[in-house]
Amino acid sequence: MKRPLFISKNVNEIEQLINFAQEKEIELIAHSFLQFEAIPFKIKSSFEAIFFGSPRAVDFFLKQEKLNTSVFIGCVGEITAQSLIEKGYTPNYIGKSSGDTSKIAIEFKELVGNKIVLFPQSSISNRSIATVFPSEQIKEISIYKTATYPKSIPTCDYYIFTSPSNVDGFLIENKFPSTAKIIAWGKTTEKYLIEKGVKVEHTLKNSTVEELIEYFNKLD
């Protein structure tokens, strides 16, 4: 039986989920409401540590800058770590529960101590890691901008949202069916959905496609 499922990611990001949906006869609708564009930037002062919140931040930053080998590199999770490794950098800290940014922020802060930390991020970043640091210890730079492109989505049984911005993009032209079950791609998105008055059925701890598939397998 087909169970319509929506996820706010582009199809080129979810090959494993596509294969799973075909196997289980799930009608999968994949669409990100967001598009990204680089912002030229200059780093005006030195820093001792850096934190990457996504593979996208890695890509946009390293297209314009290189990292000194002495810089302490932190990242939100394994997928972002892999992006760094592919570009020749080994992260010193990798978040183990990428869906729980509060926990990651505390762990990273303990590791870097009093180091000056650079946060390369989106122009609409939620700043979920940076906010745990005193303002004099951090430097924040916008390295890419995020634009929202709304689209009407057919009615589904499940909706998986990967960011607060994608929630906003969805709500421009869509509403949640009363019977829909909503899955959040981590605690930041969960919190945002709840603020919008949306009941969250499940929140991913590690925010990976593998974890999502495991969740659906347990429902069968």
Image: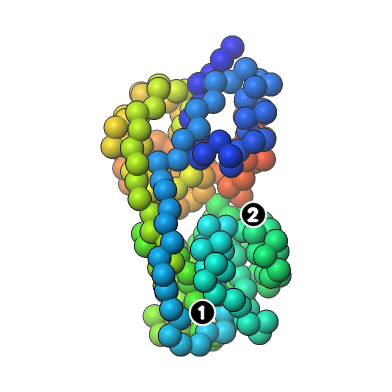
**Which quadrant holds the N terminus?**
top right
Q: Secondary structure at mark 2?
A: helix
> How many other residues sit within 10 Å of disc 2, few (<14), some (14-19) or many (≥20)?
some
Residue 164 percent location from the top left of the image: 40, 48
Height in image: 136 above or below 172? below
> How many other residues sit within 10 Å of disc 1, few (<14), some (14-19) or many (≥20)?
many
Residue 142 percent location from the top left of the image: 40, 68
> Can the viewer see residue 35?
yes
Q: Which residue is mark 2?
A: 79
Height in image: 218 above or below 111? above
Residue 116 percent location from the top left of the image: 51, 84
Q: Are marks 2 and 1 in contact (CB under 8 Å)?
A: no
Q: Which residue is mark 1?
A: 117
Disc nearer the start of the sequence (2/1): 2
Q: Residue at x 68, y 58 (%)?
A: 82
- Left or right: 156 in relation to 85: left
- Disc 2 and disc 1: Cα gap in Å? 21 Å
- Left or right: 103 in relation to 195: right
Residue 144 percent location from the top left of the image: 42, 62
- Left or right: 115 in relation to 126: right
**Which quadrant holds the C terminus?**
top right
Task: Please say which color scheme the image uses.
Answer: rainbow
- Going by the numbered disc 1, the residue's amino acid type is Val
Q: Residue at x 35, y 28 (%)?
A: 152
Q: Residue 147, labelled with which disc?
A: none
Q: Residue at x 51, y 79 (%)?
A: 117
Height in image: 117 above or below 165? below
Q: Secondary structure at mark 1?
A: strand
> Can the viewer see residue 105?
no
For the residue pair 95 and 141, the one nearer the viewer reads as 141
Hey, which residue is sitting farthest left in the picture? 172
Q: How many marks?
A: 2
